[in-house]
Image (cartoon, helix red, strand yellow):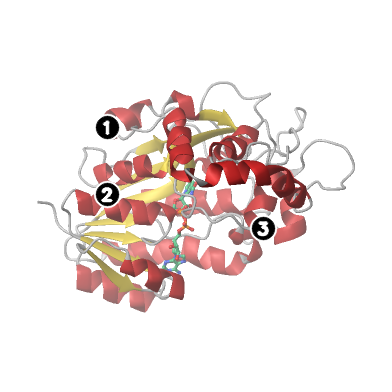
Amino acid sequence: MPGTVLVTGGFGLVGSATAARLAELGRTVVVADLDSPANRKAEMGLPAAVNVQWVDLTDAEQTARVIAEVAPEVIIHLAAVIPPGIYRNRELARRVNVDATRALVGIAESQPRLPRFVHASSNAVYGARNPHRVTGAVTADMPMQVSDLYSAHKAEAESIVRASSLDWVVLRLGGVLSVDPKAIPFSADAIYFESCLPVDGRIHTVDVRDVAWAFAAATTADVVGEILLIAGDDSHRRVQGEVGAALAGARGLAGGVTKGRPGDPGSDHDWFVTDWMDTTRAQEALQFQHHTWQDMLDEARQRAGAARPLLRLAAPLVRATLKRRTAYYKQPVGYANPWDAISRKFGDCSPDTQR
Ligand SMILES: NC(=O)c1ccc[n+]([C@@H]2O[C@H](COP(=O)([O-])OP(=O)(O)OC[C@H]3O[C@@H](n4cnc5c(N)ncnc54)[C@H](O)[C@@H]3O)[C@@H](O)[C@H]2O)c1
């Protein structure tokens, strides 16, 4: 049985599913995450085989202590500050996404036995993607391109990992979804953020359980030095506007989500940092795709159960309420302008300029 796996950000969306998958495989797992009331509560629900180390990864001393104590054979590095929160707190986000990744890699490199480093990157590293101008899906060998703060952080962190002396594996994730409504909080920020994005922008979704499967498989598979694109099978090649609406519909809120705006076909910038991904090599190496898009909708519908008829009745009211919280409410007619809309609510979303 391979040795201990340390999962940073192990209480997050991807981290909790990954820790559960590793435990299911009988692996020794240590979750490393912030000591917060929410994470303390989540600790209660962890499988007995999963241990916890409370650590703020922006503190290199704490990080070094945890790595020395756990002596992991593999580090799965998921901890990050992601959209839309990243735009609200640029400095903290940089410290977590870039500086803490650099520190963690350095600490891992100084261990007596070098751990394998499985790094969570994103399809955001391809930058904004205008579906009217690009053809085909993104591939691992395409150049990275920076469009905003998040794509910049993910590209910089990935470069640090790839330049290290560790046995690294990079997993670039698509749009991670869950059939569990509690896994992705429904908040005013989330509603506004999603409404900013062009409805015809391409997004390659994936069930979080399949992502967890991929991370667990990447701890042992013959994939060192590879960049693998992690998204669902071809049924998950969707457009932004249909994803939230379809999931809401499956839960009973058909028509409860306000329609957004299409993107500007003439602009290469005013699109979000998602696209369809060529998952052929990742699937060959990790065999992780187990839930189709329709499977997810069916399961979401089944889980909503008795609440569905009530939600169906409430849908018109929900729609009217949410409409006022969307990005283009009472804005002049036009195409989606995601970066302006995001900046209006969350703050400057442009890449850092100091480098
Ligand atoms: N969710 C997606 O759709 C998606 C898509 C592409 C890539 N990714 C990447 O996958 C990874 C996991 O994403 P997620 O959706 O699970 O995010 P999440 O926000 O749900 O989880 C991030 C976790 O990191 C932890 N964390 C933040 N700052 C920390 C610090 N200073 N010290 C220790 N822990 C800290 C948080 O407490 C949280 O548990 C990230 O690297 C993200 O960029 C996610």
Which residue is the extreme one toward the top? 135
Query: Which numbered disc, 3 or 1, marks the residue that appears first in the sequence?
Result: 3
Callout 3: CB less than 8 Å from ligand 1: no
Residue on which the image places disc 3:
188
Q: Position of residue 157 (x, y in %)?
A: 46, 54
Would you name the residue on which mark 2 appears?
Answer: 21
Please state which of the two labelled residues, at mark 3 or mark 1, is closer to the viewer: 3
Q: Reading the chain from its start, which is encountered first: label 2 or label 3?
A: 2
Residue that mark 1 sits on = 285
Is 169 placed left or right of 70 in the picture? Answer: right
Question: Which mark's residue is nearer the viewer, 1 or 2?
Answer: 2
Amino acid marked by disc 1 = Ala
Query: Residue 258, position in %: x, y?
Result: 72, 41
Q: Is residue 85 visible?
A: yes
Is 188 on the left-hand or right-hand side of 68? right
Secondary structure under the numbered disc 1 in the rendered image: helix
**Label 2 CB, ligand 1: below 8 Å?**
no
Residue at the location (40% across, 29% down)? 279
Spatial CA distance of label 2 from label 3 is 31 Å
Q: As shown in the figure, which amino acid type bears the numbered disc 3? A: Ala
Question: Which quarter of the picture shows residue 337?
Answer: top right
On the image, which quarter does residue 9 sit in? bottom left
Q: Where is residue 89, by image quadrant?
A: bottom right
Residue located farthest toward the left when viewing the structure as drawn: 1
